[in-house]
Amino acid sequence: MATGAAVSRADLSRLSGLSPSTVSQRVEALINQGLLEETGAGRSRGGRRPRQLAVPTGGAVVGAIDLGAHHARVGTLDLSGRVVQGRTLPVRIEDGPEQVLGALLAEVAALAAPSSASTASGVASPSTGSTTADGAAGALRGLGIGIPGPVQHATGRIVSPSRMPGWNGFDVAAFCAGRVDVPVIVDNDANLMALGAHRTAHSELDHAVYIKAGTGIGSGVISSGRLHRGAQGAAGDISHCRVVADPAPPCTCGNAGCLEAVASGAALVTALRDQGIPVSDLTGVIRLIDDGDRHATALARQAGRAIGEILAVVVNFFNPQVVAIGGRLADCEPLLASMRATLYERCLPLATQTLLIERVATGQDIGITGAAHLVIDHVVAAHS
């Protein structure tokens, strides 16, 4: 319904393969819960005019948090996955889960408050990246959270994150559920980027791989149209696959030569500093590349090749229809060009014959969009 592929009970029955009576029962349950609404009568094709359905775009909202190492994007979205309000906030991941999550939960609550939409300006703020769509805030129906580390999806617990001191074993879902009286679903941030990108840009494709390349690096996998997590939630985590590097730089996980230690934004910062180039963060690295600095550009090309070598294994094994890269390094043309060339060089011709290799075509809200769809899917399943 949210994509427009179906606008009536008959459409839902045809697309789902369910009987008309089953569809009617489930639709009525969703209408009673405020998750669907009737909008009028459609055109008749020889019988009674069908009653058209739509996802409500006012009233209820879901909350979303996309947590990064230095910034977090928080927002509220309507039940179709459209951003109602969004805000970017600075965070210090090393401050620990209680302090970081407590502050972000307060922001979500403020955005979901009935008065928040009426007082917002609707114009992006340079300091917070705030955005407001037309429409009012409404009752919060659920909360989705993306974490920049491994998450055991069934429990919402973080397991051995390499760049999140003090977060290991922390039960994010339980902590947040104790503070908001709605369902809370937690997943890896790369998975949520993958889900958001697939729903908004590639919903017609069944098999896709999405790479999130920023301070860290990871990926999410769509298989048969659904997010693939594997047995525990670790599927798609390419960050600690070993790449050929001499010398093999140490990784925060305790091993050496991991992809994250070679090709992430943090790795590029370290490599430039080792060459005596003063750079403090990924923003500085990107600025150097944009300015044509030969050292930064060479490192970006090396990073792209390393990512391409790992992805070549993934593409040969999984045979996706699209490989898309997002995150702050996605706009780094030397990295993207090197990654693309390596994929074509290392992959089987059949695997790349129709393969799309592109940037994730959406902006800063892609993570919270994925988080919202995760929650919406859960809420709809629970009431249908």
Image (tube, rainbow, N blue to C red):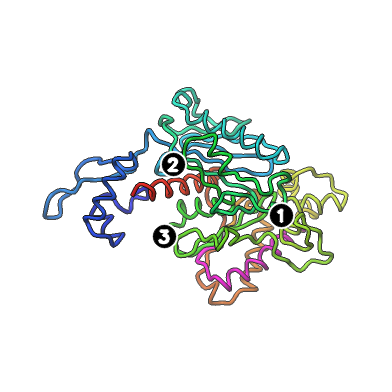
Q: Name the residue carrying label 1.
A: 264
Q: Residue furthest bottom?
A: 349
Identify the disc placed on residue 82. Answer: 2
Where is residue 268 shown, x and y percent of the image?
Answer: 76, 53
- Determine the CA span between mark 2 and mark 3: 19 Å
Q: Is residue 37 left or right of residue 273?
A: left
Where is residue 342 shown, x and y percent of the image?
Answer: 66, 68
Where is residue 194 shown, x and y percent of the image?
Answer: 53, 54
Amino acid type at mark 3: Glu
Quarter of the figure with residue 205 = bottom left
Helix, strand or loop for disc 2: loop
**Is residue 373 a member of the stretch shown in magenta?**
no
Residue 161, compared with residue 85, is above or below; it is below
Q: Is residue 42 left or right of residue 284?
A: left
Amino acid type at mark 2: Arg
Residue at 15 percent of width and 48 percent of height: 49
- Determine the CA span between mark 2 and mark 1: 30 Å
User: Do labels 2 and 3 touch, CB within 8 Å?
Assistant: no
User: Do labels 2 and 1 touch, CB within 8 Å?
Assistant: no
Crowding at label 2, few (<14), some or many (≥20) Cα neighbours within 10 Å? some
Amino acid type at mark 1: Ser
**Is residue 323 a member of the stretch shown in magenta?**
yes
Q: Is residue 166 left or right of residue 56?
A: right
Magenta stretch: dominant SS?
Answer: helix
Lower position in the chain sequence, tag 2 or tag 3: 2
Q: Name the residue carrying label 3.
A: 204
